[in-house]
Amino acid sequence: MLLPTSVRFSTYATEGRYVHTRPQAVWLAGFLLALTILPQVASLYATGVLTVMFITLMAVYGLQVTVGTAGQINVAQSAFMGIGAFTAAKLSGMDVPFWLAIPAAGLAAAVLSIIFALPAIRVKGFYLALTTLAAQVMFPIIVIALPADWLGGPSGMAVEPIAIAGRMLASPADMYYFTLAGVVVCSVCAFNLQRNRFGRALRTVRDNELAAEVTGVNVAYYKVMSFFAGSLFAGVAGAFFAYYIRYVTTENFNLLLSIWYLGMLIVGGLASPLGAILGTVFVTAIQEVFHALGDSLLAAFPNIGGGLVFATSNVILGLCILLALIFEPRGLAHRWGVLKAAYRIWPFPHS
């Protein structure tokens, strides 16, 4: 293959890379450096927003694997994230270090997701969505029904702070850097998953199950493993969220959150992890704009009530997402690819 910039690829592995040239590597390094410096110049509120956005991105990465790469509908990502959060909270109370609790939380969510992934072997589409919806509905019921000394019951659980080399991570900047390190690791895993044999098998299952069977791909196995891999990201995201807010309840992981995660992925683009990044940034930015407008409106007109402002902002946010899908149905990642291609062959036209 030959890019418009005369960059040639001799193997599939080199073609699958996301950084092909030295200028791209320099831009990526500069972007990471900017993220590292940001807490020193940004407000505490902005630092907190970015921290939550990093955690959200980890969960959306998991949806990109299950929904985007494998084509399996999942509307229970928030529930799997909650499993990871409660697992991390429980382990932190048992003095398990964070570097063991976070992988254990991801593994717990991934293993439990297999129960709800088994119907994917026989059903798809709307029926599979109902199956995962059952997981989302059952999650808070089961957690609350368990003995209070297990997972805290309706009151939830406190999470012990993270200590590294005897120093507690308590400030917003500390948690920003902690989650930044986590999202960088998740990003490397998400992008490289698309290039290996596992990712290619998932795409084959998504595009044509019959052709996948003929070529020797175990369709049932990879359908289940797509849920396993996607929920692994969700469990890790839940653990980071638990360490960030220091107290977890079932109310933190509701159906609306799962729908927002799915909306972020659809707006950004299902085809690649870049879509997860762009969709998460876009929706988070829109949410913050409407939160700021809502606060200003309440300050000017305190009698209208916060509930009405919140509902109206959510409706307008939904309309913004709808407009984004109308004008770019293939996602923001596709538009970004078109702009890059047009830049590379400029001044020649590109459609």
Image (cartoon, grey):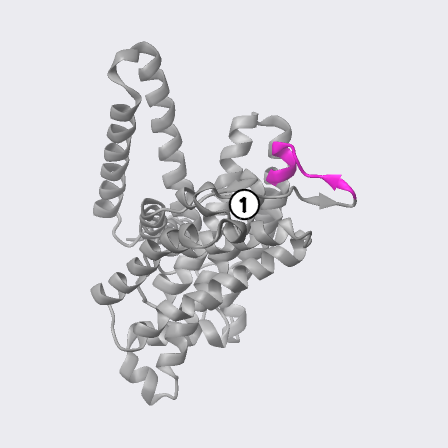
In the image, farthest residue toward the right: 165
Say left or right for 26 vs 130: right
Q: Where does the image place residue 283, in percent across and percent down from the top left?
A: 36, 40
Report the side of 259 relative to 161 (left or right).
Answer: left
Residue labelled with disc 1? 242
- Residue most toward the top? 300
Q: In the picture shown, does residue 94 fall above or below 308?
A: below
Question: Residue 276 versus residue 110: which sits nearer the camera?
Answer: 110
Task: Give the x, y percent position of residue 29.
Answer: 62, 47
Membership of 237 in magenta stretch: no
Q: From the top left corner, tell me how far across and down residue 226 is, in percent.
A: 41, 69
Residue 210 point in image, percent of width and height = 27, 83
In front: 55, or 10?
55
Count of number-bearing discs: 1
Q: Which of the 4 image quarters holds residue 112?
A: bottom left
Vertical arrangement, residue 247 with respect to residue 184, above or below: above
Q: In which quadrant is the N terminus drawn?
A: bottom left
Q: Which residues are magenta?
A: 166-176
211 or 227, which is in the foreground? Answer: 227
Front in this rendered view, residue 15 or 87? 87
Element assignment for label 1: helix
Is residue 337 shown to the viewer in this render? no
When the figure is inspected, residue 153 is found, relative to residue 307, above or below; the finding is below
> The residue under label 1 is which amino acid type?
Ala
Label 1, residues with CA under 10 Å away: few <14, some 14-19, many ≥20:
many
Q: Residue at x 31, y 77 (%)?
A: 121
